[in-house]
Every structure is written in C-alpha cells, then in structure tokens.
Image (cartoon, rainbow, N blue to C red):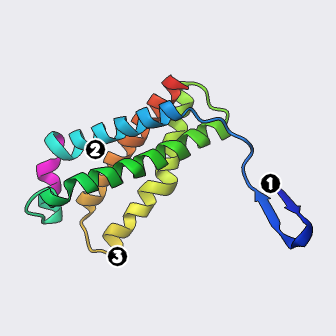
Amino acid sequence: MKIVLRRGGEFILNLLPAVTVNYTAVLAAAVAAMAVGYIWYGPLFGKTWIKLTGAKEMGNKNDMPKTYVIQFVASVVTAYVLAAFLGLTGTTGLTGALMVAFWAWLGFQAVEKVGVVLWEGKSWNLFFLGAAGQLVTILVMAAVLSYLK
C-alpha cells in the first residue's frame, strides 16, 4: 500500500499493485456465468426455485431485458474482481484458480446469503440452492479466466 501526500493536501491512496486483467477473458467468464444461471434456474432447478420463493413464475416478462442486462453487468464486475484476485495471488493454473474462487465464494458470497435466511425469513433450502448456484458459477468463471489468461 502506498500513500502519497501532494501539495495542497490531496491524498492519493494506492491499495493495489498493478494487475493485468484480460478483458476478453472477463467478458467470456461473464457470458459463461449467464449460461450457468440460465441452466441452473431454468431446466435444472427453475421449478424448485419458484416453489421455494413462492413466485408464480420466473420474474416479470416485461422487465426481462433490463434484468438480463443488469445481471450481465454484475457478472462482468464479479469476473473482473475474480481476475484481479487471480492476478494478485499469482495464480496461473486451473487448480489454483478454482481454489481462489472457492475461498472467495465461501468468504464473500456464501456467508452473505445467510442473511436471506436470518433476516428475510427464507428457507435454508433456498439458501442452499442459491449458494450452490453461486459456487458453480464462480468456479466456471475461474476456469474460463484460467484458460484464457
């Protein structure tokens, strides 16, 4: 970490060393994440998700284009941050990438989803469905990033 004080009292805080990120790999990982989500919440567990959430169907059909765009942007952010984590840790192989992804999922995504049960009154079954979906997604993203690095 580097802190620089310039004239006039302006602080510049540089928390991360320079990390090279392959933007093509980030976009490919985001597309892969969307594909996993489509399969996970579609043919694999779509009916289960609808039952567990109490929804009548999967989202509002009129809002779907906007929903997919927002989800894609979120997937790009996740892929970029995961690529940065892989760069910061010096991870180059598939096994290492999967390990970094697992620990990122466990530390940031899985534990955050516990709040859905504790504060929103959702079932543990919904937690496990969502958390498992996130795990599969981040592992696939890591595999894509590792392959295209």
Estimate how packed mark 1 is, as few (under 14), some (14 to 19) or many (20 or more) residues with alpha carbons within 10 Å.
few
The residue carrying mark 2 is 37
- The one nearer the camera, 60 or 35, is 60
The residue carrying mark 1 is 1
- Magenta stretch, residue numbers: 44-49
Q: Secondary structure at mark 2?
A: helix
Q: Quadrant of residue 110?
A: bottom left
- 52 falls in the magenta region: no
Quarter of the picture containing the C terminus is top right
The percent coordinates of residue 82 (x first, y second) are 53, 43
Between marks 1 and 3, how big is the CA–CA gap?
36 Å
Whether 32 is drawn above or below 7: the answer is above
Residue sitting at the far front: 8
Q: Is residue 97 left or right of residue 89?
A: left
Tag of residue 119: 3
Q: What amino acid is found at the position of numbered circle 2 in the picture? A: Gly
Estimate how packed mark 2 is, as few (under 14), some (14 to 19) or many (20 or more) residues with alpha carbons within 10 Å.
some
Which of discs 1 and 3 lies nearer the camera? The answer is: 1
Point out the tag, 1 or 2, that comes first from the N-terminus: 1
Quarter of the picture containing the N terminus is bottom right
Between marks 1 and 2, how big is the CA–CA gap?
36 Å
Tag of residue 47: none
Point out the tag, 2 or 3, that comes first from the N-terminus: 2
Point out the tag, 1 or 3, that comes first from the N-terminus: 1
Q: Is residue 131 left or right of residue 14?
A: left
